[in-house]
Amino acid sequence: MGATTATLEMRQAAYNPPWWQRLNLWTALLGGLVGFVFVNWVLGRDGGPLNLVFGWEINQTLVVSYFAGLFGFMLGLGALNYPIMWILGYTPSQEEQAYQYGIGQGWDKYLRMTLDHKVVGLQYLVGIIAFFCVAGFNAMMIRTELLTPNATFVDPGVYLTIVGEHSVMMLMITSGMILGPFGNYFIPLMIGAKRMAYPRLEALSFWIFLPAMFILLSGFIFGGFPTAWTGYAPLADEGRAGMDAYCIAWITVTVSVVLASINILATIVMLRAPGMTWTRMPLTVWSVSVGAILIWLSFPIMACVQSMTLFDRTLLTGFYVPVQGGSAYLYENLFWTFGHPEVYILMIPGMGVMLDIVAVFARRTVYAYRAAVVGMFGIGLLSWFVWQHHLFVSGLTPGLRPFFMFSTEMISFPTGFIFLSALGTLFGSRLRFTVPFMFALAWLPNFLLGGFSGIFLSDTPVDVQLHGSYFVQAHFHFVLMGGTLFALFAAIYYWFPKISGGRMFNSTLGYIHFWMMEIGFNGTFITLAIVGMMGMPRRVTFYASYMTEVNQIATWFAYLLGASMIPFLINFIYSWQWGKKAEENPWDARSLEWMTPTPVPIDDFEEIPLVVAAAHQYGVANAPPMAILKPSEAASGTASAGE
Amino acid sequence: MATNDSALSNTAQAATAGPSRIRSLDDRLTILGIRMIYTALTFYFAGYFFSLIYLQMVNENNMWLPKAVHQPALWLGLTEMLCIIVGGIIYFWGQWAGLYRRNFSVLRLALWITFVLSAASFVLHVYELRNHPGFANLQLGGFVSTFMGLEGSFTVVIFFATLALLGVAIRASKGLFRDSGIAVDAFGEFYGWMSAFAFANFMALYLQPFFHSR
């Protein structure tokens, strides 16, 4: 630990923060609740001031209540302290800053707006796992309902809301699934930086993400929303008050992920260590960059779309109402301009993680490294030119169909580069079948099924036949779960010894988790693809009885998939506390994050390292370590490379 | 934002160069961050401009601009826009004649004038959204919807920009920009973007739809 940090630790120990610097999650929740309740049920009640003076009804009051709740949450968290103090011309002292970084503090720093990127990464990880379990539980309810061809478990209206909550929450959390926990935790370590570019924005991005999830879940209380994740107008304009929760959750998440992506991009562009050239970076860094660029540019469009829906619902404008001069096509076009890049936002970061992990366990230099990078950027670029394939059956001008069919099929080329790189790395190597490698390896066939079914669906005649069927549902689950979720678990197991502060997970439980998930996942979605080919539409509780048995098979596999989280959670919690002590670099990885001590010091590196080789040069004879960790000592001849 | 974190920010350049270099890196980060933020906002507003063009072209049920809708009050739109643009010009003057020549009284004066103009523009926007002179209600077609959406969103941006400007002006009054004026420069870029946007907004909402007769 550097002298600077030690000094700060000593000063921090003597520092007694005032109450407004000790605000945390609990005060934030209280603030959010007070803000929401005060506006919604005190000011906004029937006959209340908002109703009497402004004539506001439920939608207007609810929207303002959500924003009041959000404001209360931020105030209760202390997130507004710094902006207010900045406006008033105040500059925080060193002690205050050290306190905000959580230096020398216990676990309570995880419940506050702490500025250390490792803390933010872990906050994201725990948050994402928790909400993933909630959304997964919704999926189990969906499959339970579909055990029978009639609505027996839940009311059809409630069923639609469950489908919506499941899909929207999954999409929101997978948008930040790699970028949030691993981008924040590991990007500075991987590029040799001592911090993120904007620590306050980084922390803010997580603490905005959290209330967004609560807002989304609150949709249940206000009658739910009938549109599932797409929120199509004009149905959205007519939906119950729960639809407002959907719109505001998207707008809030947009602020969160855009801030996160700006922070990560600026970090990668500006804070790379000397010698960390573009071609020496781990592919995880590249893939997170591409994902961040797509988030930065496409999510604001989604916020715009949802603000239009809110205006329609609360101010009675008519963006999507034809009798008022609006058009539902306006929604569809704008929505999918965001919606298709969103698919790649979810999966591209997983590609980099998979390729890096494959290289580590194959002990081979990443094959066709540059082609893989070009592939990721190619996918990201093409993702902007395919949106109308979602509108093939919506009355799109027939003359445009071939272009969008062709542009969609084109995506298979850059995606092929990723497979080329992965297979080339694996070819002829001696593999180590560890748990993270198993997940990374499974990424390939799982995502391949999603990719192939995607090429199939991009053909207009096929799309017209299968649109809105379970085949489409199976396709995007292969892409998103196969491409993102398997990468997430590969990443969790791979970096577990680092993030847990030096503990190793239990391999047996890890293998059990893997096989349950792999079998459950493929069993569920291959079966659902078959159900789709049999003609079953999405988002229905009633279906023809001849599909009952196939649906039941899918449900049992889905239960297996859901149950696979049990060994994972046990393993995660148990190993974090009582797991065997891990070696400093248990996988013999080359990248910089494994060259730092565990637990990682507050300022990551004692000195900014000097990078002298690429991260992915495995199996290269006499390849030097990636970096000189103490360039000043090396310059004076007292340390060798890698020390 | 990162300017004050130098004790914890021994970045690459920081480790190999002196304190002035530290400021330089943080300054560049601040400028980069502000550019990325207004680029993201541009994509947000691009959605509204798309709606302006799309709904106008489609003219669903001849309801893009029904006869009951009149041109929004030009004096109001013009004043709102001029407040922002003139504020931008004065800010620019404050940067060059004040900050760069280290004449901080000029800087302070320019910042406070810009703040007043920005706040005036905000108040006018709120008045306009509340009373929408030019059309009786918001159900009168695609143009009215786009007008409300675009102006409403821009009003939110002006609100936060005015708050930030207040902070910049107070900090200037306290003499906090003597070492580094990066906050002034960064916010200046943002205000420049806002001025350009105010002009585009005025053209798109107050003039373009009414160029041709109905």
Image (cartoon, coloured by chain):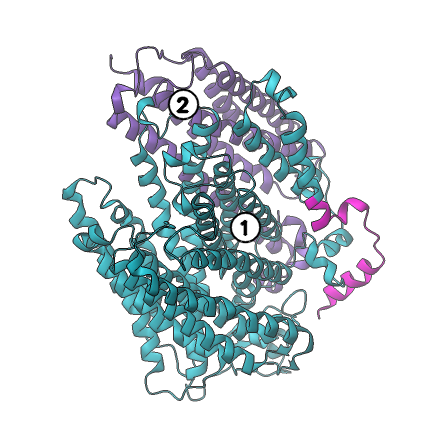
Chain colours: A cyan, B purple
* Residue A532 or residue B7, whichever sits in front: A532
Query: What residue is rendered at 55% in x and 79% in y?
Result: A509
Q: x, y (%) of residue A621?
A: 42, 89
Seen in the image, is B116 located left or right of residue B140?
A: right
- Name, please, the residue furthest toward the left: A399
Bounds of the magenta segment = A1-29
**Magenta span contains residue A2:** yes
- Of mark 1 and mark 2, the one earlier in the sequence is 1
Q: Which residue is mark 1?
A: B29
Compared with A19, A237 (above or below) is above
Seen in the image, is B96 located left or right of residue A284?
A: right
* Residue A198 or residue A534, whichever sits in front: A534
The nearer-to-camera label among 1 and 2 is 2
Q: x, y (%) of residue A147?
A: 41, 60
- In the picture, the quarter occupied by the N terminus of chain A is bottom right
Does residue B93 show up? no
Query: What residue is rendered at 46% in x and 15% in y?
Result: B132
Q: Residues within 10 Å of mark 1 (few under 14, many from 20)?
A: many
Q: CA distance from mark 1 to mark 2?
A: 35 Å
Q: Amino acid at mark 1?
A: Leu
**In the image, which disc is placed on residue B147?**
2
SS assignment at label 1:
helix
